[in-house]
Amino acid sequence: MGHDHHGGSHQHGPQRDLPPGMLEQLELAYAGLASFGHRPFLTEVEQLDEWQPDVAIVGAPFDIATTNRPGARFGPRAIRATAYEPGTYHMDLGLEIFDWLEVVDFGDAYCPHGQTEVSHNNIRERVHAVASRGIVPVVLGGDHSITWPSATAVADVHGYGNVGIVHFDAHADTADIIEGNLASHGTPMRRLIESGAVPGTHFVQVGLRGYWPPQDTFEWMLEQGMTWHTMQEIWDRGFKEVMNTAVSEALAKADKLYLSVDIDVLDPAHAPGTGTPEPGGITSADLLRMVRQLCYEHDVAGVDVVEVAPAYDHAELTVNAAHRVVFEALSGMAARRRDAAGGKPGHPSPLAT
């Protein structure tokens, strides 16, 4: 499907060369169009039919459901525009990502100021346009309320009860109502459970800590059959052990996996640019490896990365962490495809053998 700007040709699907003008606009990290990973930028659903990509990036610039510091509406643009350019080769996997995975940037859902219902409906429709074509949506938030329409759109395609969610977060986001708001960024997982789109038994949560949720909410979560791993458990058992448990739990939940990453699952030392920072979180190294593993071992139907609020960031720490989360998800999907096709890895560390 053409050539990426580093010169690697895509090895599956129809071959297409990018027009010279598009290639030039996607060439430099500091110039041209702010497209995620310098991937081709599409705007119309008809273009999805023409390109037939494996993955489409979708922005969800919506943040009026926040309870503390706003600003996540600027997350999609910042992740596209101010993250350090990573290249396309994955050292640990010996993999040219875009040789095995065609990825496009499908722009943003239209989220007009102050209109929650309109914005959420537009997010759901744009994600559905992607997922219904057999393309994996990777959604850049936005506050965590966007997971309600995004994951619902994925379940609309694959069937209610057929999608499991692995949810990285400092908070469970299972409140019923917050200050009169059913669509708060603290309520999306309850909305998904109550609607039947994703049953409580199909959730695995990682990284919970701090002051919320309270005991009565945890009791409701137990009644729904939810599974979670707190930071205390990670401290007691070690991250690798908890990661192995969580991955195996997710495999048992449903055929399709939706991965939701609230960037505040990271310790604020790694991700200060978020609306509800909670000290005592996991490191970016641990998160990136777990995301990669999940996307390698599972049939991924959707991903979102939310709560990046660049106005509170320092040296693009949060933006870069979120950007790498997406690239690790893509690398896991690409390696899964490569290995299923009998491809061989490149040059991992000799210590790995």
Image: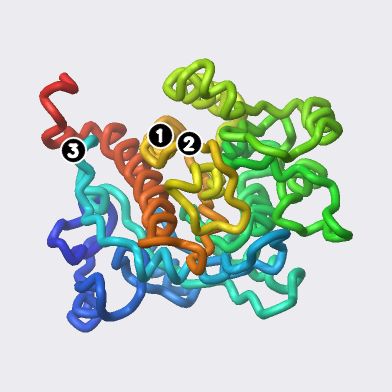
The crowding category of the residue bearing disc 2, from other C-alpha atoms within 10 Å (few below 14, some 14 to 19, many at least 20), is many
Work out whether 251 lies above or below 281: above
- In the image, taking residue 84 as reference, residue 316 lies left or right, namely right
Label ID, residue 41: none
Nearest the eye: 267 or 324: 267
Nearest the eye: 87 or 82: 82
Quadrant where the C terminus sits is: top left
Q: Residue at x 66, y 37 (%)?
A: 210
Residue 156 locus on image (x, y percent): 67, 51
Residue at the right extreme?
Answer: 180
Quadrant where the N terminus sits is: bottom left
Residue 49 locus on image (x, y percent): 44, 67
| Quadrant assignment, res 79 | bottom left
Q: CA distance from mark 1 to mark 2?
A: 7 Å
Q: Name the amino acid, label 1.
A: Asp
Q: Which residue is mark 3?
A: 94
Q: Secondary structure at mark 2?
A: loop
Mark 1 in CB contact with mark 3 (< 8 angstroms): no
Work out whether 163 lies above or below 82: above
- In the image, taking residue 345 as reference, residue 144 lies left or right, namely right
Residue 258 locus on image (x, y percent): 56, 43
Q: CA distance from mark 2 to mark 3?
A: 26 Å
Q: Which residue is mark 1?
A: 286
Q: Name the amino acid, label 3.
A: Gly
Mark 1 in CB contact with mark 2 (< 8 angstroms): yes
Q: Which residue is mark 2?
A: 282
Q: Secondary structure at mark 3?
A: loop
Q: CA distance from mark 1 to mark 3?
A: 19 Å
Q: Residue at x 22, y 62 (%)?
A: 15
Nearest the eye: 318 or 116: 318
